């Protein structure tokens, strides 16, 4: 299924070096904060962010009638680049967006000027299966990626057993609770800012429930990720993880080990979100990386 409209927007001068921001699974592009984007554009970058299919203002589908896989979500990266006239770009990716960025860097190296992955997992590591086994209380096979933090497992176990939220406010309260858990314990949590963000996410979504199609896409092709290919990445790579990462703790070091010449940066206090306290450090690191 390829004919899904993808919402995107760009910032900065068209003549500046392009950065394509790729957000994680089931996530809208506006989770790349305006202040962070502004720091990148002020540093002389043309920045593009977009909503994945079935999120935000991008098109939604009836998955049963028009199924797709994560290959299609990955191919949307090329579609966004093509629509903005980019033969190549610096890819800056968060969470599952990092899997997409790594895959693109392996598959089409000529299109990736540099790669930055934040709070992600190594391509081919089976991160989704690790999380599901953790939630189900199953033993992890030897050599598996590190499990998510106990608070992550406890939160989603509770969520899986809970009834659906009754109304908009209950849904947004649940989204804030999820953001609080992903934020981690290393920095203060701004609940008012979180409410403003989650209200915006709720109100701009064509169909908020459509994000579940990303899970169906993963189940439709569980072996989406190629295994043992990260040594093929040619793009200069920066790997970033928060010191309080709850979802994928320790995964960044494994990425950095597998990609030749990759550099690892640990951001003090950061969890699995992008709060204002880390914008300056993140933007400075990415501007330096994309200047090379």
Image (cartoon, rainbow, N blue to C red):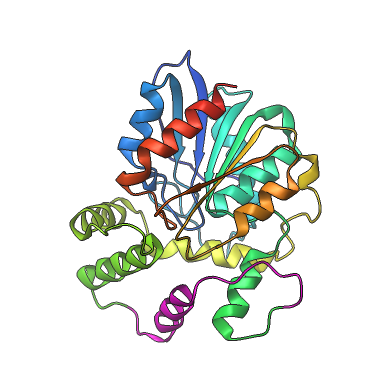
11 vs 286, left or right, is left
Please, is residue 145 above or below residue 116 in the view?
A: below
**Quadrant holding the C terminus:** top right
Name the residue nearer the viewer: 46 or 57: 46
Name the residue nearer the viewer: 187 or 153: 187
Name the residue nearer the viewer: 6 or 162: 162
49 vs 192, left or right, is right
Position in image of residue 231 (x %, y %): 80, 44
| Magenta segment boundaries in residue numbering | 141-164
276 vs 145, left or right, is left
* Quadrant position of residue 8: top left
- Answer yes or no: is residue 153 visible: yes
Which residue is depicted at the point 45% across and 23% down? Answer: 46
Please, is residue 154 above or below residue 188 in the view?
A: below
Position in image of residue 102 (x %, y %): 67, 45
In the image, is residue 132 part of the stretch drawn in magenta? no
Position in image of residue 242 (x %, y %): 47, 53
Which residue is depicted at the point 23% across and 68% down? Answer: 168
Position in image of residue 76 (x %, y %): 58, 42
Which residue is depicted at the point 62% across and 58% down? Answer: 251
Q: How many marks?
A: 0
């Amino acid at each position: 299924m390829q004919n899904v409209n993808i919402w995107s927007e760009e910032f900065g001068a068209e003549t500046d070096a392009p950065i394509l921001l790729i957000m994680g699974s089931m996530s809208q592009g506006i989770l790349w904060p305006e202040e962070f984007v502004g720091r990148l554009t002020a540093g002389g970058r043309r920045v593009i962010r977009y909503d994945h299919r079935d999120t935000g203002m991008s098109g939604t589908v009836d998955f049963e009638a028009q199924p797709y896989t994560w290959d299609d979500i990955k191919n949307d990266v090329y579609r966004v680049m093509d629509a903005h006239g980019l033969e190549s770009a610096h890819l800056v990716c968060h969470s599952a967006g990092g899997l997409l960025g790594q895959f693109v860097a392996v598959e089409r190296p000529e299109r990736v000027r540099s790669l930055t992955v934040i709070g992600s997992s190594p391509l081919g590591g089976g991160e989704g299966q690790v999380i599901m086994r953790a939630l189900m209380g199953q033993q992890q096979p030897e050599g598996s990626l590190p499990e998510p933090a106990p608070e992550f497992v406890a939160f989603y176990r509770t969520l899986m057993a809970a009834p659906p939220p009754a109304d908009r406010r209950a849904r947004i309260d649940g989204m804030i609770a999820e953001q609080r858990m992903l934020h981690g314990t290393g920095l203060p949590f701004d609940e008012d800012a979180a409410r403003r963000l989650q209200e915006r996410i709720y109100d701009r979504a064509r169909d908020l429930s459509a994000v579940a199609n990303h899970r169906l896409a993963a189940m439709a092709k569980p072996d989406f990720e190629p295994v043992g290919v990260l040594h093929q990445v040619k793009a200069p790579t920066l790997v970033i993880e928060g010191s309080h990462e709850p979802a994928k703790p320790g995964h960044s070091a494994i990425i950095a080990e597998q990609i030749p010449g990759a550099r690892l940066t640990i951001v003090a206090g950061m969890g699995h979100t992008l709060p204002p306290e880390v914008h300056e450090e993140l933007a400075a690191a990415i501007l330096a990386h994309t200047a090379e």
